[in-house]
Image (cartoon, rainbow, N blue to C red):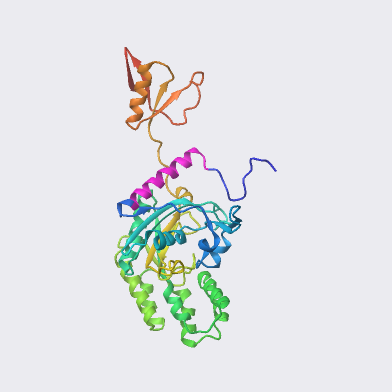
Amino acid sequence: MSAWLLPDHIADVLPSEARHIEELRRDLLDMARCYGYELVMPPLVEHLDSLLTGTGQALNLQTFKLVDQLSGRSMGLRADTTPQVARIDAHLLNRRGVARLCYCGPVVHTRPASPHATREPLQFGAEIYGHAGLEADLEALQLALDCLKASRLKNYTVDLADVRIVSALLEGVGADADTVAQVHAALAAKDVPALTQLTRDFPETSRRGLLALPQLYGDVAVLAEAQKVLPALPAVRQALDGLKWLGGHLQGTSLGFDLADLRGYAYYSGVRFAVYAEGVSDAILRGGRYDEVGAVFGRKRPAVGFSLDLKTLVGAVPARALRAAIRAPWGESASLRAAIAHLREQGETVVCVLPGHESEIDEFQCDRELIEVGDRWVVSAI
């Protein structure tokens, strides 16, 4: 095997794409800061018991494991950053009030999420801790949409759901964990025959509600239909009212509701949302409420947030024009070097042409050049 070949679904990011990703990263972090979110940088590797505690089997299977040569303990490369941020909120910050945190860094997956996905996403996310009301859910959604606006993403739809609906319908049915997992999978796939078989011994009220969920997707009218066909359980009513309230505050956004959608990590506990864009096979952004995620660290706090992969996002948004650059000759004169330094201090990109390379392709597509006029160096249009 050639030494320069990379593992499947692992790839180098070359200059033009890397430049676009970095511009997106800065824009999204700046947008999060505008909302008052503070940047944190969790480590890429952690002890496995801390990294995976309470996260569910799906994340466990996505996590690369290794042995720490210093302690002999099992460690893992993070596959998702949210549990780490929950640990930071619970143990390191330990604030009594609201904490708004954001992050951007690589995660590593044992398997790609889809046939064309990378196993090394660059995950950006933002999370708000300490507020249990729908106001925090709405803030997370609005920040997510403003981030997509800053990225110049066009033609996308926001899908909303709430895991409490399914949880309420499954409460008291007496099913084991494996059956519950199969029910979740059948709901996500809208596999009605499988769902019919799995729920055959469930109480009639729960069974009827679960079998109705695969048909409950579409626009806001779905919520009114759900009020009619789903059991009048308090948790179901609360979830439907919350979805209606959120939808009412997102006027002008293309909205959908899918009450059977349970895809994503198992730690979600309330409202969930996903953004789908044209030309992208899977959700380009996912988020929701996960009030239980900090409990395993000894401090259960209300929490809601979202994350996305910048590598996926960059492929779904228009390419950005290169920032204009200035071409300059190479030379040892003090006046030339001072002129170049002054331009760079002003934020200009100045590319020096090294001796013998004057005819090579200009990767920066310089639109100006630094030329000597008399005893002065001036910038002139090419």
**In the rendered view, would you say 119 is above or below 216?**
above
Q: How many labels sit on residues?
A: 0
**Which quadrant is the C terminus positioned in?**
top left
Q: Nearer the viewer, residue 131 or 256?
A: 131
- Tell me where residue 60 sits by quadrant: bottom right
Where is residue 115 drawn, in percent x and y? Answer: 57, 56
- Is residue 274 visible in the rendered image? The answer is no
Q: Nearer the viewer, residue 193 or 294?
A: 294
Residue 166 in the figure: left or right of residue 94: right
**Which quadrant is the N terminus positioned in?**
top right
Residue 322 in the figure: left or right of residue 196: left
At x 40%, y 43%, the residue is 23
Q: Which residues are magenta?
A: 13-32
Majority SS type along the magenta span: helix
Where is residue 199 drawn, in percent x and y? Answer: 54, 82
Where is residue 7 drawn, in percent x and y? Answer: 62, 48
Where is residue 206 drawn, in percent x and y? Answer: 47, 83
- Tell me where residue 379 sits by quadrant: top left
Q: Is residue 31 magenta?
A: yes
Residue 198 in the figure: left or right of residue 331: right
**In the rendered view, would you say 82 is above or below 328?**
below
- Is residue 248 visible in the rendered image? The answer is yes
**In the rendered view, would you say 27 is above or below 362?**
below
